[in-house]
Image: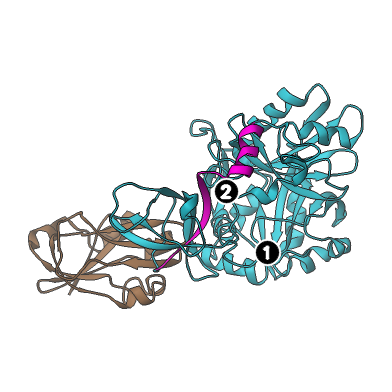
Amino acid sequence: MTTLYTSDHEWLRIEGDVATIGITDYAQSQLGDVVFVELPKVGRSLKKAEAAAVVESVKAASDVYAPITGEVIEVNEALAAEPALVNSDAGGKAWFFKLKISDKGELGGLMDEAAYAAHTA
Amino acid sequence: MRAHENSPLKQTPLHALHLARGAKMVPFAGYDMPVQYTAGVLKEHLHTRKDAGLFDVSHMGQLVLKAKSGKVADAALALEKLVPQDIVGIAPGRQRYAQFTNNDGGLLDDLMVANFGDHLFLVVNAACKEEDEAHLRANLSDTCEIVSLADRALIALQGPKAESALANLCPDVSSMKFMDAGPRRVADIDCFVSRSGYTGEDGFEISVPADKAEALVAALLDNPDVLPIGLGARDSLRLEAGLCLYGHDIDTTTTPVEGALEWSVQKVRRSGGARAGGFPGADKILAQFTDGAARRRVGLRPDGRAPVREGASLFADATSAEPIGKVTSGGFGPSLNAPVAMGYLPTALSAVGTTVFAEVRGQRLPLKVAATPFVPNTYKR
């Protein structure tokens, strides 16, 4: 299992041809208290860099982009009921959606943990 | 709103304290202001409703209006040329909400006016303060002196424990009622205190000499009930209280009647009153009191959890192509644990309970017109 990161502060956990996607702890700390999460529909085909989900704090709405191309195969319904999970466990229980990866070649453009740490330093 | 992007940001006398308390700073009306501290907007909002919150609002304008005759009634009569409120009727030691109108009946700014016995004390919005001062000078200089109190900070202390926190430093404030205002000694500092605010909670606004502001705030923050609160929670608190934000919910294109601010225009200034009219745009505004206006500001409660924010178009139904109005303020209300908004609708569709739709990310979300305040206010009347 590999974890990769984007410059837009999303993380991807890669297991076989499935990527689980969420936002990083750094991202949630910048957003502040999350009060609403809108998730994509299961079955939707997402293109890399397409707006896939929305995360809203008291103050503002932010888009979550698809870091890679793929089909949505599962979404985290728990986030709709408890948006604050994004603040308490961004890297774990607060995953947003799972994608069936279309092109593993796209993973090459993403950062590993060390590169992401340098990006947010 | 003025464009301040090219000039360096100004700082309030409490700037160093914001940084020391871990505030996240943002540009606001030309000032570098705290949008939140380490607790975050949600906790700061809830703390203010439960205990007490301290806000730095020193960016706002503070002005003295004094008649050359020395009589406060003459300053009040002069100011009535620029606002549709009964200023003459403000008793000494009392304060009232007012608006500067333009010739089209629109609003140049909203403000607080207090009678300090021999002069009037005005608090105006930060983004409008230069224009407001120029407007006063251009229109009232023949009879009045206008003094900008740029050397004073302004602090708001809001919430159910505001009275006990301030009474520790000035026992006299306990006897003040909502909208009482006047000079008070607070922690041995000469201050102007009013029992008012912008959160819907009981509380105070305290004008303090700039060089004493940090000492006063430090004394207030020594009280564990009091936390510093940023502009983020100030906005969510005032939105839940149904209070207008100038430049958003009201502006130069909205009249007091369209803005649902009829309550702020006393009968003596309306048609048939002893001092009816006589302010810019009076013909249009007074006609709207009689005939109504085509549109009206309303409170809105989205049905679901999704916040509907400023700028969202409003529609009569889920499919119609033509928008009927617009959201002017919207977000999440932490005390309601639900989204809240305000906006303008055709008066025919402005009744409480009416369902309308907002377009958010390409979807039509239902909202209901709701009475404001969304959260009951707790003013000490």
- The chain shown in brown is which? A
Question: Which type of secondary structure does the marked residue at label 2 adopt?
Answer: loop
Question: Crowding at label 2, few (<14), some or many (≥20) Cα neighbours within 10 Å?
Answer: some
Q: Return the chain for callout 2.
A: B
Residue type for callout 2: Leu
Q: From the viewer's perspective, is residue B337 above or below residue B121?
A: below
Question: Which type of secondary structure does the marked residue at label 1 adopt?
Answer: loop
Residue matched to label 1: B201
- Would you say residue B11 is visible in this rendering? no
Query: For residue A84, what is the image quadrant?
Result: bottom left
Asked if the magenta segment contains residue B302, the reply would be yes
* Residue drawn at the location 27% of the way across and 54% of the way down: A7
Q: From the viewer's perspective, is residue B282 above or below residue B313?
A: above
Query: For residue A6, what is the image quadrant?
Result: bottom left
Q: Colour of chain B?
A: cyan
Q: Nearer the viewer, residue A73 or B285?
A: B285
Mark 2 or mark 1: whose residue is earlier in sequence: 1
Q: Which residues are magenta?
A: B281-303
| Residue B348 position within the rendered picture, expressed as x and y whole percent measured from the top left | 48, 52
Residue type for callout 1: Glu
Residue matched to label 2: B245
Report the number of discs. 2
Q: Nearer the viewer, residue A111 or A21?
A: A21
Q: Return the chain for callout 1.
A: B
Q: Nearer the viewer, residue B294 or A105?
A: B294
Q: From the viewer's perspective, is residue A121 above or below residue B104?
A: below
Asked if the magenta segment contains residue B155, the reply would be no
Question: Crowding at label 1, few (<14), some or many (≥20) Cα neighbours within 10 Å?
Answer: many
Which quadrant of the figure contains the C terminus of chain B? bottom right
Give how far apart the Cα atoms at labels 2 and 1 are: 17 Å
Q: How is the image coloured?
A: by chain
| Residue A17 position within the rendered picture, expressed as x and y whole percent measured from the top left | 9, 71
